[in-house]
Image (spheres, helix red, strand yellow):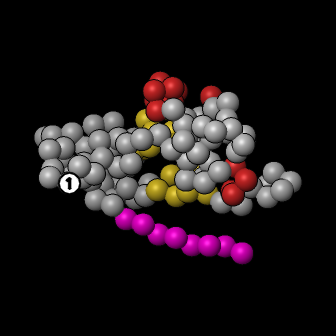
Amino acid sequence: EMCLSVFAWALQAGGAVDRRVGENFPRPHRDQSYTQCHTSDGQLRMVTCWVPLVPVTACSGCMYVVPADRDPLLDRPDAPAHLAPDAAAARPLGEPVPCEAGDVLMWKSNLIHWGGACEEGV
């Protein structure tokens, strides 16, 4: 059974009144645990999809991901830090994923990721 969920956010340059505006979930996180997005025999059953509506770069709010081979807790949902990864440890492992408007990014929902900030003047 497939569960469809859709959310939309608009980034604005930093300095906005709302502390969340200008940042797209800036803390490294997983959307789901390994157990929630894999079957009992390890088959993938859930992905996260992100589609920017404008071109994005490291200066304008692109997504960052920690490649699975750099994540020692990827398939360890029992680990205390699995769903709340240490941001200071995750950030140096992350890779920016700049892309064009309309590009589709998809990843396993237990992959660590976060959104970059939209800088002033961009």
User: From the viewer's perspective, is 90 left or right of 78?
Assistant: left
User: From the viewer's perspective, is 90 left or right of 77?
Assistant: left
Residue at 43% in and 35% down: 96
Q: Nearer the viewer, residue 111 or 80?
A: 80
Using the image, determine if residue 41 lies above or below residue 75. Answer: below
> Is 5 one of the magenta-colored residues?
yes
Q: Where is residue 18 in the image (x, y as percent from the top left)?
A: 20, 54
The residue identified by callout 1 is 18
Classify mark 1: residues with Cα within 10 Å, few (<14), some (14-19) or many (20+): few
Q: Position of residue 68 (x, y in %)?
A: 64, 36
Q: Which of 29 and 118 is in front in this view?
A: 29
Q: Where is residue 55 in the image (x, y as percent from the top left)?
A: 32, 49
The segment highlighted magenta reads: 1-8
Using the image, determine if residue 84 lies above or below residue 3. Answer: above
Q: Nearer the viewer, residue 63 or 34?
A: 34
Q: In which quarter of the image is residue 60?
A: top left
Q: In which quarter of the image is residue 1?
A: bottom right
Callout 1: helix, strand or loop?
loop
Residue at 57% in and 73% down: 4
Using the image, determine if residue 85 lies above or below residue 10. Answer: above
Q: Is residue 57 visible?
A: no
Looking at the rendered structure, the kind of residue marked 1 is Asp
